[in-house]
Amino acid sequence: MVIIDVKDFKKSFGSKVVHRGINLKVNKGECLGLVGGSGCGKSVILRSLIGLEKPTSGEIFIHGQNIAPLNETQLVDVRKKVAYVFQGGALFDSMTVEENLAYPLKEHTTLTLEQIKRKITDTLNGFGLQGSEKLMPASLSGGMQKRVGLARAIIMDPEVVLYDEPTAGLDPFNTKKIQEKILELKAKGVTSILVTHDMPTAFAVCDRMALILNGVIAQEGTTEQLKLDHKGAMKNFVTGEAW
């Protein structure tokens, strides 16, 4: 079952053409790795999937609904189902960890305060972050901030998760924690797209990968297919260590 279907996506910023016609499909429970050089517009595609950017032309279907023409009010329901994990965590600096996680639950659910507190505790425990509820973001390490950001993104039990460089700059311990959580969510049937330059993580968690080059998908295939391809565009992109 196709959950995400991007059709002939084109995007320009003024005279700068970023995407010349991107076509992507992601099936239910699948993790697609989206890779490419810096500035090729990987994050632009992710942002467009929740309406933070609008395509210059083309269509973006989520569960069969074209979200490209939707306004902010209409996008609220989409964003309840599609979570975005921002590269820097994007936590509210003036809120504690607990308050950060409580915010979407208070805004978009009818849970009681006790139910919200229990859900926050369970979610943080799942990330190895028990006892961090009263901490402020500024007192967290970079790895902890990213884990809290991911915890907040998934606390609404989204059907789709969009990861924007979730392991960038992380030590091996935190990278492993993020990988484990992505695999855990995938095992529960969550559909996802992973934008990354971390090729070992991409090969560890993704079912398929797509390489953006010159504004189009230059190569796409399963991770196993791409490991065996020794002369394609993907091979030229990744380091030999990833193979």
Image (spheres, rainbow, N blue to C red):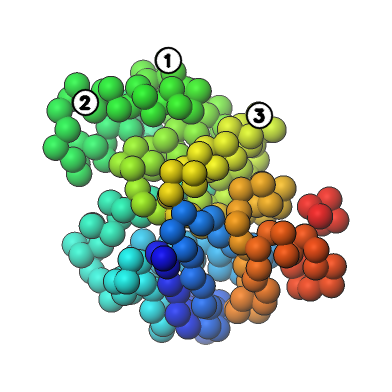
Find disc 1 in the rendering and name its residue: 131
Q: In this view, does 69 lie above or below 75?
A: below
Relative depth, front residue between 52 and 2: 2
Q: Residue at x 85, y 56 (%)?
A: 240
User: Circle 1 sits in a helix, a strand or a loop, which is it?
Assistant: loop
Q: Residue type at mark 1?
A: Gly
Q: In this view, does 20 lie above or below 137?
A: below
Residue 173 image position (x, y, % from top left): 65, 29
Residue 193 image position (x, y, % from top left): 51, 57
Q: Residues within 10 Å of mark 3 (few under 14, many from 20)?
A: few
Residue 89 image position (x, y, % from top left): 47, 41
User: Circle 3 sits in a helix, a strand or a loop, which is it?
Assistant: helix
| Residue 84 at least partly seen | no
Find disc 3 in the rendering and name its residue: 173
- Residue 227: image quadrant is bottom right
Q: Residue type at mark 2?
A: Gln
State the separation of the CA atoms marked 1 and 3: 19 Å
State the separation of the CA atoms marked 2 and 1: 18 Å
